[in-house]
Amino acid sequence: MGRVVIGCLAVIGVISMFVLAVTVFGVYLVVNRHGRDTVAEVAPHTLLRLNLGGSIAETSGSDPIAIALSGGKASLRDLVDAIDSGAADPKVKGLIADLGRAQMSLATAEELSAALGRFRTAGKPAYAYADTLAESSSNTQVLYLASQFDQVWLQPAGEIGATGLSLELPYVADALKTIGVTPRFSQRYEFKGGIDMYVAPGTSPALKQSLGTLVSDLYGQIVDGIAAGRKISADEVRHLIDRAPLSANEALNAKLIDHVGYRIDSENALRKAAGTDTGKFMDAGDYLKLAGPLNGAGERIAVIYGVGEVVRGDPEESFSGNSQMSAEEIARAFRDAARDPKVRAIVFRIDSPGGSYVASDTIWHAVHQARQSGKKVIASMGGLAASGGYFSAIACDRIIAEPASLTGSIGVYSGKFVLTKLWDKIGVKWDQVSSGAHAGIDSMNNDFTPDEAAGFERDLDRIYGDFTHRVATDRHIPEPEMDAVARGRVWSGAAAKAHGLVDELGDFRAAVIEAKRAAGLDANAAVDLVTFPKPEQSWQRFARMVGRVTRTEASLQQFGEMTKVIAPTISRLAPSTAERLLMSPLSDQSLQ
């Protein structure tokens, strides 16, 4: 019987490695194709097609897994660059966007809306089409974006399912207690909320009020944007959202859309509006590869992207391809940009929920060093620049955010799960040999001693005090006023501006214009936007990807052995919770 089992496992192992090898080869082909240049030209009477299905990444970057998994789908930066380039290109006569499967943050919708406004100002028609709009979710921000087009088309069987904004928060404190897991976390302060799901039975009144204000703020932005775009009153928009879902004909009668028809109908209508019967559609990503972004050959502006969780050191490779805001990588990028004599200013684009306190400090210092070298640094906030993401921004000369950017969250949390009762339940015993009174402070097999607990709380006080002091200093906010804007509260970009946490509301383009002014250039001057660090070559992506696959395969083997012991016990929890329990303790203080 044992031989049969071993034989089966061997076959499974061979198959797994074969699948991994095929995946590596397939991904390499995608990456290599993605990076190839082409000699084709943009044809006259071109019509751009924006495929906005699924979520939209901030930037395509150089991650091979992310590129492969996205199928080469255009990122937010690619889409905006394509729209702006098309607006200035006489060969481009119009554009159409497919919103049928679109998912995006409101800040992303605002960024795309600004680009569409520039395209329409150039005298070119922009149409939107959807077979159905937010049919299975309340993705109301997609209706906000749709309202910024010249015309909106909806398939006869479709509907508008924009039903408002809703925020749901899970709480697993009772479940953790049931399985013998004791959370030992603390945070600063009541609006932070990062640990509440583990330690509280539900949302506290303070946090509920704070989040309610945030959701109401964002909802108001959506309503006002739809009202302005569709030329109806805000009260009528609220009434229509409360009536949703709306059928295609109901949406037409309510003036939320312009036509009921199929994709081919919307395309033919766009051709007519663009004055071309022979116009051919081209994907925005393909167009951008041919035409390139609307950069000039003028002075150089460096662009540094800080996307994903803020982490110490270099980016940790993961098979998921999730982006990380690596402190060392970002710091190197700032040093290189600061040393480049051709760089006149730096735009720091941030889309991050936060992360390690130490890593955030590393980035903060790198920004200050770049400024001390004489370079002006302008922060541009995407959908998220919160906690550690906001910490990274405060050192910049100026901060520009979208009205719907989520920012602030000036606070900290940390802690660990204590698993001693869980081990007792499943019959697992641990022993240890150590030197030092607090050698086991980070271990999930030891609870905090009273002395350790007191030191842990003092450490959080120190970090919170340092965070708020730096915000007060860099943002010129009097220390006595910091309490009103900190305590972990999350603000929209619009609210953050009112409280002095950001300087200006606008998109990435607005940040580039501000960088020009800071460098003493005219706002309309042509500039060369250069990304730091330089993108990897295809062979470098491939080599890194092979290494990632190898490490992932080894990690999965180790993970499989560990989960044989405790997976049955935690399987009743939500997958995300189970994943957190299997992670190492949160020894890094987290600005999230």
Image (cartoon, grey):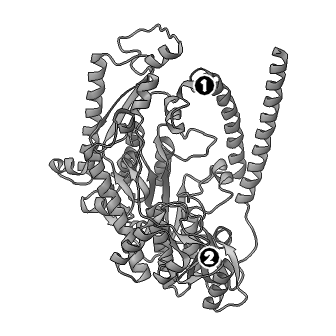
543 to the left or right of 449? right
Residue 196 drawn at (x, y percent): 35, 38
Disc 1 on helix, strand or loop? helix
Residue at the left extreme of this rendering: 480
Q: Which residue is mark 2?
A: 155
- Taking the spot 35% from the left edge, 11% from the top edge, the residue there is 437
209 to the left or right of 121? left
Residue type at the position of mark 1: Thr
Residue 220 drawn at (x, y percent): 34, 67
- Taking the spot 43% from the left edge, 28% from the top edge, the residue there is 176
Say if 372 sits above or below 265 in the image.
above
Name the residue nearer the viewer: 63 or 411.
411
Disc 2 on helix, strand or loop? loop
Specify the quadrant that holds the C terminus.
top left
Residue 354 drawn at (x, y percent): 41, 45
The answer to which of marks 1 and 2 sits earlier in the sequence is 2
- Taking the spot 30% from the left edge, 49% from the top edge, the residue there is 208
Say if 186 sits above or below 304 in the image.
above
- CA gap, disc 1 to disc 2? 48 Å
Residue type at the position of mark 2: Gln
Name the residue nearer the viewer: 198 or 34.
198
- Taking the spot 47% from the left edge, 7% from the top edge, the residue there is 433
Residue 366 drawn at (x, y percent): 41, 46
Picture quadrant of residue 177? top left
- Asked if one can make out residue 521 in the rendered structure from this viewpoint, the answer is yes
Which mark is drawn over residue 87? Answer: none
Which mark is drawn over residue 563? Answer: 1
Specify the quadrant that holds the N terminus.
top right
Picture quadrant of residue 418? top left
